[in-house]
Amino acid sequence: MMATIKRREGKTGVSYLIRTYSGYDGTGKQVEKTMTWRPLPGMTEKQIEKAINEAAVIFERKVKDGIILDGGTRFSDFATRWMDEYGATQLAPKTMERYKALLVRINQAIGNIRLDKLRPDHLQKFYKNLGEDGIKSTGSTATCVADLTHIIKSEKGVSKVKVAEHAGVAPVTVTSACQGKRISLTSAQAIAKALEYPVEKLFKIEKEHAPLSDKTIQHHHRLISSILQTAVQWQIIYDNPARRVKPPKVERKEAVWLEDTEAQKVVEALASAPIKWRTAILLLLHSGIRRGELCGLEWSDIDFENNLIHIQRASQYVVGMGVIEKDTKNFSSVRVIKLDTEIMEVLQQYKIWQTEQILLQGDRWHRKIPIKDAHGKVSMQKNERLFTQENGLPINPDSVTDWVKKFREKNSLPQFTPHTLRHTNISLLIAAGIPLRNVASRAGHANLTSISKTYAHAIKTVDEKAASAIGDILNPAKMKKA
């Protein structure tokens, strides 16, 4: 049956409804496919007639060839399907967790729009709205106004870790709440529910009035574009409207690191720290590995004879799953790093200490631990982890960040996080004149361009030293005076 064309007039002007059919459904009813075509301003009646007839022929052919499937699906419905069919197999659990959070705001804005009706201007207006003051009011925050530590330990008789598990939040979130720090309203509600308290009795709820950052807006755009591009690949829509929209440009920021004198103060303060944490922080500083890579290390990865460590896996905490084991960030992150004798001696001492602790723990020590992969599959493996909980179970990477914060405040040290130590290691190597390619290889960076932009200041400092050195060499008089 040939496509039919119907002229319509509305508030937005003249449009044409093109209708055709694609077989029959299970009840024997014809499956109707439609599209709306709008003439460009200034087109004559003759031009419109020619263009609409061409559009009808093309639409009918695509329907016949199966290219037009179900463009009438709402964005939110397809996004759910995308998360279930694509995300579950192609995305890391942490990425899935972040995307679910982003989709809450996205679906509020464009979730009810049909895929075939979604236009670039819808997205442009959405991104503009995200950048306006007050947008974060949809993500209210909460500050604890009760003695949460007393309620957890004395009244309920449980640990913060157990509350975190029951609430489905990270342990560091419960700790932050106990310390009176702001947490998300969602986390506050989950904690209150776990403790069987009304959220209003435990927390003061506040609305933030600030725009989202350009980087966060770009994250929204990338997710929308990925979902729509899949709809194109699955032949549900013709084109991806997100490809014709430019989100705010994000300026790459230089990494924040400690100066050499600041790093030395950290090392000095670590002398009185517990051996487990002293070893972990010194290893981060000496190797430049990521926090998750540190928590994924096993003793079989340490080559004491040749002073080498092998980076082969990473640990990650995912809400609802707990601590999981995942691959490193990218292919180049699987690497072998040479370490100096000093840190290897620290590791030797720590290994002796850990062996003593295993004997003291007795039956409490888990000689086999459950390793959960990115898909939730659990396997029992021999416990060879370097850094664990007291009973030998895998350590939550968030606990490293939490300890660093307390250590920093206790010793009045400059602001730094575990990731700052990674940046410090890389910048110190660059400042020492180590070739950029070698630095990138040790750090597990995927390309030199990324490291060049991120550590531009350190590279500039080395370049200035090089310029001064060549000037000294080519100026004998200056050298003689020196």
Image (cartoon, helix red, strand yellow):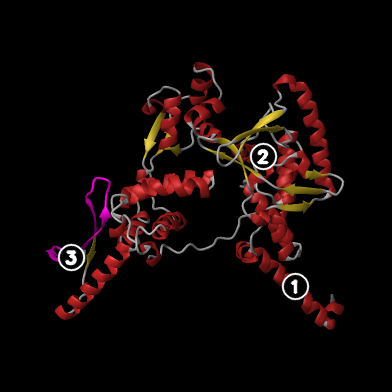
Residue 4 - label = 3
Tell me where residue 366 sits by quadrant.
Answer: top right
Q: Residue at x 68, y 66 (%)?
A: 459
Q: Residue at x 35, y 57 (%)?
A: 236
Q: Is residue 395 above or below residue 201?
A: below
Residue 301: image location, x then y, percent: 76, 44
Instruction: Specify whether residue 71 is painted magenta.
Output: no
Who is closer to the viewer here, 218 or 59?
59
Type of amino acid under label 3: Thr
- The local secondary structure at tag 2 comes to loop
Tell me where residue 244 sits by quadrant.
Answer: bottom left
Type of amino acid under label 2: Asn
- The local secondary structure at tag 3 comes to strand
Left or right, 272 with respect to 152, comes to: right
Residue 330: image location, x then y, percent: 62, 54
**How far apart in space, not on screen, are marks 1 and 2 (Cα)?**
37 Å
**Do callouts 2 and 3 mark residues in contact (Cβ within 8 Å)?**
no
For marks 1 and 2 on the same chain, the one whose residue lies earlier in the sequence? 2
For marks 3 and 1 on the same chain, the one whose residue lies earlier in the sequence? 3
Instruction: Specify whether residue 10 is painted magenta.
Output: yes
Rate crowding at label 2 as few (under 14), some (14 to 19) or many (20 or more) other CA atoms within 10 Å.
few
Q: Is residue 42 visible?
A: no
